Image (spheres, rainbow, N blue to C red):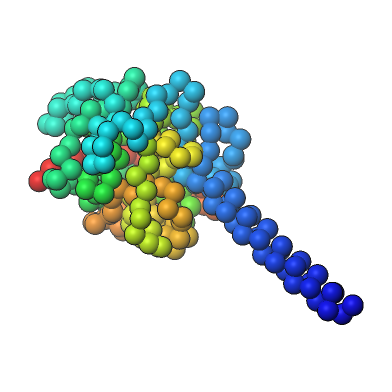
Amino acid sequence: MEQRRGQRRRQARSLAFLLGSIIVAAIAISVLSGDDDAEVSSEDTTTTSAASDESTTTTAASGPAGDPAIGTTECPPADGTAERTTTFESGPLACIDPAKAYTAVVETSKGEFTIELFADRAPKAVNNFVFLARNHFYEGVLFHRIIPGFVVQGGDANGDPPGTGDPGYSFADELPTEGPPFYEIGSLAMANSGPDTNGSQFFVVTGDNGASLPASYTLFGKVTEGMDVVAAIEATGSEEGTPSEETTITSVTITEA
């Protein structure tokens, strides 16, 4: 009898551990996803990129590995002379050369930070980011969700409320494979609302909680200068993710070498 009770206790502990693991996984999913219906509130969301029903989704079948194209929209001029555009019928053609090096300088209302873009590891995501930046998509856009020790998230020019919008299309994941950990403080990754739902929203990892995320988010860059500025933005955040003051992106300037 005592042996049976011991077995039942061990089974109960095992079940509790399994349920705990499931709950942790569910929290990670809910913290990093969302939808247009805002069923997941800002209290338990962090990296949200919601694709509308009308959005065009480009899957991995759009091209071979290393092909940066995710759609049929023409590339904007590299000199920054394009008119600001925030909605597109399709993602871009190949606007970058994955063999080249790309850097983004993000000017914000709190200062600027510099990002090394990983064109060789995530050519589609970098192509998309460069395309949007050269179309001035990010200008005036808020960092709408900020959780200290976790992430600083922005990049939604169309959502009402911010965090529920997209550029009119979505594209396939390019998930990290080196890890765990898959991310580090300063990592730049695409926000999403599930597999292959990348659009325009991105986040910068600012703490250990963000660095411990599962490999469910396309890693496409890292902050190399200006983490003090990122920290200043992070300082306006809250546990709920709602910032205490607005921080906007003034411009994103792309350089190619």
Q: Say left or right for 256 vs 154.
A: left
Which is nearer the eye, 101 or 172? 172
Q: Say left or right for 8 vs 237.
A: right
Q: Say left or right for 23 vs 232.
A: right
Find the residue positioned furthest to the right.
Answer: 1
Image coords of residue 187 (percent x, y): 33, 54
**Residue 127 position by quadrant:** top left
Image coords of residue 86 (percent x, y): 33, 25
Q: Say left or right for 36 vs 87.
A: right
Specify whether residue 83 is in view. yes
Number of callouts: 0
The residue lying at 42 percent from left, 24 percent from top is: 55
The residue lying at 31 percent from left, 34 percent from top is: 138
Specify whether residue 255 is in view. no
Name the quadrant of the N terminus: bottom right
The residue lying at 80 percent from left, 76 percent from top is: 6
Find the residue positioned furthest to the bottom.
Answer: 2
Image coords of residue 208 (percent x, y): 44, 63
Image coords of residue 195 (percent x, y): 45, 40
The residue lying at 45 percent from left, 20 percent from top is: 54
**Residue 227 position by quadrant:** bottom left
**Residue 172 position by quadrant:** top left
